[in-house]
Image: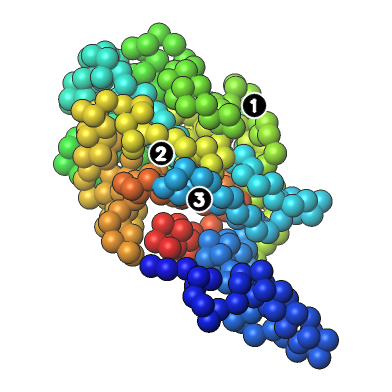
Amino acid sequence: MFEVSKLSNQKPRAARRRATVLAGIALAAAGLQAPAALAAAPDPVQRSVNGLVRDDGVPAALAAVTGRDGRSRDYTAGVGDLATGARVPRDGQVRIGSTTKAFTATVMLQLVGEGKVGLDQPVDTYLPGLLRGDGIDGRRITVRQLLQHTSGLPEYLTAIGNILADPHRYYEPRDLLDLALTRKADFAPGTKWEYSNTNYIVAGLLIEKVTGRPLGEEITTRIIDRLGLRHTYVPAPGELTLRGPHPEGYQREASDGPWRDVTELDPSVAWAAGELVSTNSDINHFFTALLSGKLLAPAELAQMRTTVPADKLGPGTRYGLGLMSQPLSCGGVFWGHGGDIPGYHTRGGVTDDGQAVSVTVTTIPDAATVQHVDTAVDTALCR
C-alpha cells in the first residue's frame, strides 16, 4: 500500500484541496453543480439514518458506531421534537426496551458464576410454588429455559393489550406474572422456542429472591456502575419521563394518522424485560464489555453464547441466554439484543473483532422499516 500524495506526479495535499475548492467556486459562479468526484463521499451510516427519516418517514433516527480502536461516532437525522422542531440530541437517551434482557441475563449469569443459581435447576428451587397454571409448573421449568425463551410460559402482554390505552399505569411484577398465568402454557418446557417477556419477569423475581435486593439495584451495581455507563439507568417507581437530553418518542394509531407523543410512559409494564433507559454509545459499551469478558467469566459467557434457532426474529437468527446472534452480509455474525417499547425501536450489537453499532428510531416501525433499520446495522458493521 502507498499514499497517493507521495507519488511524484501528484500535487501536494494542500494544493489539491485548494484546486478542488477553486474548481467548485468556478462552477458555482457559472450556475453549475460540482461533479460528484469533487464532493466528499457521504458516510454510509449517515446515508442510512437519513434514509430512515426521508424514505421511511420516522420522526428521528440516531446511531452510534464504535470501531475496533474504541473510538465512537454519533449520527442523527430528523426532528427530536415535532411540536417544537428541536434538533435530535447527539447520542440522546432513549428507552431501550428488550435490550434490557441482556442486562437481566448478565446479572443472572453472574449469580451462576458465584454459585448462587444453577442454570439447569428448576425455578421452584428458588421460587417454590410461584409458577402453577394450565400446563405450567415451576418444578419442570429451568432457569436456562427462562433466559432462552424455551419455557413455554405464555406472553403477559397479550392480556394487557394496548399499553398506550393507559400509559401511566404502574404494574407490580407479580401483576404482570398473574396476567400470564391466566393463560395456558404455549408448549411443554424445552420442546420449542417462543419469545415471551414473561420469562424475564420470572427471572427478575428470581434475582431479587436470591440476592435479597431490588433488581434495579443489582443491575446498577453489577453492570451500570461497574462499566461507568453514565447515561444508563433503571427508572425509579413512578418515573415517567427521561432524565437527560432525548428525542421524543412517537406512535401512530393508523398508518396515515397523526403522530402521538408517547415519551411519557410508566416503564414498569416492561420491568426486567424492558424498562431501562440508555444511549446508543452506552449500549455499544455494554455489549463490547460483555462479549470481551469484562462482566462474565469464560464459562458463563460461553453459556450465554450457546444458542438455539430463533428464525422468527429473522433469517439465521439464533438466541442464547439474553443474547442473540445475527448473520452479516459480509460474513460472520454480530451479537446483541434489540428492543421495542412505545416510542422507540433499537437494534445493533458487536462483532467478535470489536466493532459495535446501535441504531434507534423514535417509533415502533412497520415491518419494512424494521428491515431498513437492520440494513443500517449491517451497513455499519460491514463497511
Can the viewer see residue 309 in this picture?
yes
Q: Which dot marks residue 287? A: 2
What residue do we see at 36% from left, 27% from top?
A: 295
Task: Give the x, y percent position of residue 368.
Answer: 48, 66
Q: Nearer the viewer, residue 84 or 185?
A: 84
Tell which of 284 and 52 is nearer to you.
Answer: 284
Q: Amino acid at mark 2?
A: Phe
Give SS at disc 1. Answer: loop
Mark number displayed over residue 239 = 1
Q: Is residue 227 left or right of residue 112?
A: right
Is the residue 61 above or below the residue 143 in the image?
below
Amino acid identity at mark 1: Glu
Seen at 78% across and 51% down, the residue is 86
**Residue furthest out toward the top:** 212
Q: Name the spot of residue 333 as percent of width and height, x first.
A: 30, 53
Is 122 above or below relative to 280?
A: above
What residue is pinned by disc 3? 65
Quarter of the figure with the C terminus: bottom left
Nearer the observer, disc 3 or disc 2?
3
Alpha carbons under labels 3 and 2: distance apart:
12 Å
First in residue order: circle 3 vs circle 2: 3
Residue 315 visible (yes or no): no
Residue 232 picture location, percent across and down: 55, 31
**Up/down of 97 relative to 216, above or below:** below
Rounded to the nearest whole Å, what is the CA distance between mark 1 and mark 3?
29 Å
Q: CA distance from mark 1 to mark 2?
A: 26 Å
Callout 3: few (<14), some (14-19), or many (20+) C-alpha neighbours within 10 Å? many
Q: What residue sits 41% from the left and 47% below the top?
A: 68
Q: Position of residue 35 (x, y in %)?
A: 64, 85
